[in-house]
Image (cartoon, rainbow, N blue to C red):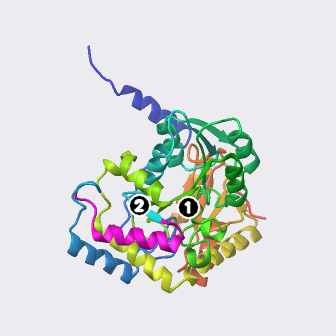
Amino acid sequence: MSYAPFDWIDDEARRRAEAGLVRTLRPRPAETELLDLASNDYLGLSRNPEVTAAAAEAARTWGAGATGSRLVTGSTALHAELERELADFCGFEAALVFSSGYAANLAALTALTGHDSLIVSDAGNHASIVDGCRLSRAATAVVPHADPEAVRKALHTHGGRALAVTDSVFSVDGDAAPLAGLAGACRDAGAALLVDDAHGLGVLGEGGRGALAAAGLAGEEGIVATLTLSKSLGSQGGAVLGPARVISHLVNTARTFIFDTGLAPAAAGAALGALRLLRRDPGLAARAGAVAVELHGRLTAAGLTAVRPDAAVVSVRAPSAESAVRWAADCRTAGLAVGCFRPPSVPDGISRLRLTARADLTQGQIGSAVGTLVATAPLPVG
């Protein structure tokens, strides 16, 4: 009798194909003529000569890899320097760098809660937050999107340790969380607030200091932030920012810190170079936001349905998953790369094209992108 333990995978693949939900890898070349509105390179720094030079210098100085976990050989003076400057820039007491933003969210959620805790999570939160909630062993209440009152009610159902968690800017529609209201609900309940500022750093706040700085909440005792180094800073990695005692606790208890190899020196060097560039040119943040607003205005004026952006993400609705895939493919054929979000990546089941409003886009490129999107739209415009 034949033994075929993975035959079930063929059934799953067939169902995905029938639903138009097949995902494929598409390796990109080093150089391309495509206009990129698909990446998260909000400030256009991933290929900035100063940033790439910082990465190269870090690799030459510290080696190609971190060589071990942060608690063994994987911490360098460069990592410590990056942590100090991130904390100072964003307005927090301390910071801890991880190998990815995903790992940072898992660390914060699992180390700051436990089986006797309650986590209150926004229904639109990123997958890394969802997975962190699952791994935490805490009771988790998922509340309606961007609803501080729902968070308040959920927190008051629990008498012990509690934490509310939210994206600062949601990656699907680009809308911002009501941070002031959420912070108030947490203060009233004696709960902590964890904010994933992956899409806020470099775009929101004075000079790009992030959504919590913009809301006047950075550095508050009960607030912890996570972020990624792979979006506005054009590098790779993640970080947790908060009170020094929280960061010390993570060093001692967070499994994705203790047991993971440290961030590669080149990535740390690139992130530090980008952060210093942003300090010198704070107008980059405002430019990214202005491009997003212009893209939204021109697309909606042309008859497309787009969500007004609060940061640098512009979301354009598609009538179905299949049409979204076709629309994105038609854009690529016409020379424009855009993101395509479909179920299960979108919690509301509505498929979208996702556009990145980069600070380095020219007026000609903005006009070209809008023209391509309108010309390839799956439904008549107007």
Marks 1 and 2 sit apart, C-alpha to C-alpha, by: 15 Å
Q: Which residue is mark 2?
A: 96
Q: Which quarter of the image is occupied by the N terminus? A: top left
* x, y percent for residue 129: 53, 47
State the residue at coordinates (55%, 81%): 284
Instruction: Report the magenta stretch's main SS.
Output: helix
- Name the N-terminal-most of marks 1 and 2: 2
SS assignment at label 1 = loop
Residue 169 or 296: which is nearer the viewer?
Answer: 169
In the rendered image of this protein, does residue 193 appear above or below residue 367? above
- Rendered residue at 26%/59% (across/down): 74
Magenta-drawn segment: 73-93
Judge whether 124 appears above or below 85 on screen. above
**Mark 1 residue type:** Asp
Local secondary structure at mark 2: strand
| CB-based contact (under 8 Å), mark 1 and mark 2 | no
Residue carrying label 1? 197
Residue extending furthest toward the top? 1
Report if residue 18 is visible in the image.
yes
